[in-house]
Amino acid sequence: MTRTPRGSGVLWLGALVVIALALPLVVTSRFYTDIFIRVLLFAFIGVAWNLMGGYAKQLSLGHAAYFGLGAYTSTILQIKFGVSPWIGMFAGGGVAMLASLPIGAVCFRLRGPYFAISTIAMAQVLMLLFLKFRDFAWGAEGTTIPNLGNSPLMMQFDAKAAYYYIALALLAAALAITWWIERSWMGYYLVAVGEDEDAAAAIGVNVPKIKRHIYLISAFLTALAGTFYIQYIYFIDPNTAFSFNISVEAALVSIVGGIGTLWGPVLGTVLLEVTSALLQSWLGSGLGGVQLTVYALILMGVILWRPTGLIGVLTDAYDRLVNAGPAPAREASLDG
Amino acid sequence: MLTTVAQAVVNGLLIGGIYALVSIGVTLIFGVVKVVNFAQGEFVMIGMYISYFLASRFGIDPLASLVVSMPVLFVVGVLLQHFLIRRVLGLGDMPQIFLTFALSLLMMNVALMLFTADYRTVQTGYTDLAIHLGPIYIAVAKLIAFVVAMVLSAVLWVFLHTTDLGRAMRAAAQNQDVAMLMGINPDRVFCVALGVALALAGAAGSLLMPFYPAYPMVGQVFVLMAFAAVVLGTLGNITGALIAGLMMGVAESLGIQFVGADSGLIVVFLMFLVTLIIRPNGLFGGWAR
């Protein structure tokens, strides 16, 4: 959890909000706006993942399942029933929550690495099912979203800035939810489960219930991202909607930024997406594999040298600046 | 009908031998070092590329290149344990999962940069040969792969049960603290476990090469299959992994035969998930984790 002093914290937050709101007014290039939207979207997915993966340490590698369910629910509702994606988005969230119950019932039987693997299997099964169901969801070819021009009620806009503000609102909401959970009884229960499930159960935490609840929230938020992303790129197919890369990136941004912290996923996304954009402008799109190679190296570096992530680096630097030395016996923001 | 089923079962068993080799490696590492190696499939990929380059540059038969791929990957395994995995032992799930996961990501993408995404195949004298047993057709390359895989598994079993080092590994798997008290050096045992597991993955790669294309992401197929088999066969149980690996091959093959060409994985994953629901500890009891 962030430990900046109260007063300066509010100032920082205010400055950040002003910058975030003003950014599309200052930077109008479509190229940069696209990068900002990607940053906001993946930060949002990371924050959603981090609620479960970071605080409760249920390291899912299958969040693409909910991203895809959200994306497909709103798209099917829109194309087959003419329902606005604004409604479809929340319907998708509902579907994801419903799906998280049986999926959680199965996967939570396993712990640690095997929990992670079982979530991969779940997301893969869903992707394979959508690849098979041709008449129901367009099969492997996928479909384009009909372009209605500027149609805010159908979540379609001419101006990229509109997408920016939607993504920003999603991220702000997810951060607010995380902030609130961090300070509620639920936050303490989650951290207890994350530190030691058996010990948490022994002191009376209803571990299955708390896991189920956080999974519901995390799945719901991830599904919203799915709808937004498909509306943004105007195309859906199983390989996009259930892409393993979504699951990976959700976990990656959180770990690189600082797992189990409010701002970790945001910092991690900024670092990774900026790196990726730089690589792309240097190398063009010619050399496949470079981006993920760099991601993998960053991830390894974080795990081997800085398990607290970027946020750990920054708080250490802050302490050194302010206190001229590491703070004595500062409570660690991460176990281990 | 019966012939179709028998044919599917035979095909499944043959490829299941390869799944078994990969699964045994995963379960060996998990049993001894208590780490799940997400990169195990990528070492199969390395084994394949070693055999591919030896075959295409020097005309060496992929089966003969076993004597290169296995020792090379044994050394890689020892180095991997010594320089990377050792540093995250005892640090909890997150570093352990994501270190090998990052390694897998790294290896796939470096392979993509070095070798491109092209499928590489090796044509051998026996690639298209087949034996006919009545109505059943057995591809020679797959049969050889299966037989060698079973021989290697048997050798591993003998090693674990009759040699001092093998007994030390089993002791460390059962109770590390007591094993250390008995004078077993855990670092050495862990290094050997990683080395043996990766050598098996390399062997799987070389055995696959006569009938299976090599490409950078090829390991994903095998690792997902192996994870399912390892859970089904009870974590850490080597005989369990062997049997479950063969079962996975048969399940996949029956799925392809009766549900559709792209359904093999669905059947395997469903089997995996059903196992989790009814027997989360796997078919062979043992400890839960």
Image: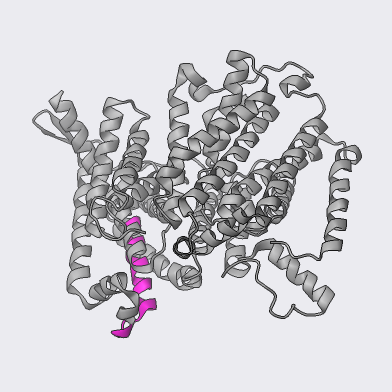
Residue furthest to the top in view is A81
The image's colour scheme reads one colour
**Where's residue A1, x and y in %?**
68, 61
Specify the quadrant of the image occupied by residue A213: top right
Who is closer to the viewer here, A202 or B94?
A202
Nearer to me, A194 or B259: A194
Number of numbered callouts drawn: 0
The quadrant where residue A227 appears: top right
Pick the front one: B269 or A153: A153
Q: Is A254 on the left or on the right of B289, as rendered?
A: right
Taking A280 as reference, is B22 above or below it?
Answer: below
- Quadrant housing the C terminus of chain A: bottom right
Q: Residue furthest right?
A: A26
In-image side of A29 versus A230 (left or right)? right
Residue B133: % across, % down: 10, 34
Residue A105 rendering spot, x and y as whole percentages: 42, 43
| In this view, B196 is above or below A38 | below
Is residue B199 inside the magenta stretch? yes
Instruction: Name the residue located 19 percent from the left edge and 57 percent from the top edge.
Output: B151
Does residue B177 belong to the magenta stretch? no
Depicted A64 relative to depicted A227: above or below: below
* Most foreground residue, A4 or B71: A4
Q: Is residue A241 visible?
A: no
| Residue at the image position 84 percent from the left and 74 percent from the top | A322
What residue range appears in magenta? B181-201
Tell whether B288 sits left or right of B139. right
Q: Residue furthest left?
A: B134
What main secondary structure does the magenta stretch of the protein show?
Answer: helix
Q: Residue A232 location in percent, x, y?
A: 70, 29
Q: Is residue A74 visible?
A: yes
